[in-house]
Image (tube, grey):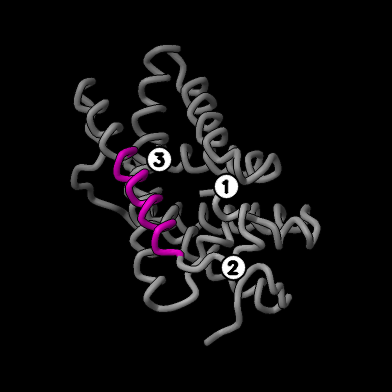
């Protein structure tokens, strides 16, 4: 996906996001399937029903706010040229028709990635190393590595976000709050990036409104 968006003369020149969204959705479904199967093999259960308390929801809100602050710092560390060349701009929906698949992708991504990294990878690495701290660090590192197309600065922020959400999972005892935070963050980040692209009038990032 990164190669396809970067090979164009800019994300705005990508004809339709539909194929990109479909490819990414299939990838997320595969990640979910592999993680779910790995959990079954180890007798692990992560996505069962859970009773959420006000404390859990408050922890989710605080985590989301901290993640937003980390994203803001990440943006400030980038030059305008770096911001306008972010390949993820190529995934942002431009129409309502493209918006629905993007929201579905954001939801699937939140579920599959939290299950795969904050759930299965963390649990397996903790069992292998005998240390929850080591398990969290390894899972966060792997999560950052798979985001390498976004660049080193993003990987560093993503590593911190992964550790923060792992702490949230341990605190709440469930993946569901982290999934909700992940989904909300993805959607808000997409809306924010689209708004900044239009306000800055980056012709190679996003086309104007129809």
**What mark, if any, has residue 64 been given in the picture?**
none
For label 3, the residue is 169
Q: Which residue is mark 2?
A: 13
Q: CA distance from mark 2 to mark 3?
A: 40 Å
Q: Which residue is mark 1?
A: 3
Q: Earlier in the sequence, mark 2 or mark 3?
A: 2
**Picture coordinates of residue 140 (x, y %)?**
52, 32
Secondary structure type for disc 1: helix
In this view, 73 is above or below 118: below
Residue placed at 60% from the left, 42% from the top? 149
Side of 168 where 71 appears, left or right:
right
For residue 6, side relative to residue 118 (left or right): right
Circle 3 residues within 10 Å: few <14, some 14–19, many ≥20: many
Q: Work out whether residue 94 or residue 120 is closer to the camera in this orientation and state it.
A: 94
Indicate yes or no whether the magenta region holds residue 181.
Answer: no
Q: Secondary structure at mark 3?
A: helix
- What residue span does the magenta drawing correspond to? 17-31
């Amino acid at each position: 996906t990164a190669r396809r968006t970067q090979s164009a003369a800019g994300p705005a020149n990508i004809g339709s996001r539909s194929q990109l969204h479909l490819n990414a959705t299939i990838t997320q479904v595969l990640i979910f399937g592999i993680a779910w199967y790995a959990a079954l093999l180890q007798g692990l259960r992560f996505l069962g029903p859970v009773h959420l308390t006000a404390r859990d929801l408050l922890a989710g809100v605080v985590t989301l706010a901290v993640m937003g602050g980390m994203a803001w710092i990440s943006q400030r560390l980038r030059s305008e040229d770096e911001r306008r060349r972010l390949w993820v701009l190529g995934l942002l929906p431009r129409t309502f028709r493209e918006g629905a698949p993007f929201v579905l992708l954001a939801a699937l991504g939140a579920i599959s990635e939290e299950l795969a990294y904050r759930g299965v990878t963390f649990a397996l690495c903790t069992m292998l190393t005998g240390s929850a701290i080591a398990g969290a660090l390894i899972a966060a590192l792997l999560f950052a590595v798979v985001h390498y197309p976004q660049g080193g600065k993003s990987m560093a922020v993503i590593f911190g976000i992964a550790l923060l959400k792992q702490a949230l999972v341990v605190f709440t005892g469930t993946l569901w709050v982290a999934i909700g935070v992940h989904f909300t963050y993805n959607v808000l980040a997409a809306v924010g990036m689209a708004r900044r692209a239009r306000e800055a009038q980056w012709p190679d990032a996003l086309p104007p409104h129809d």
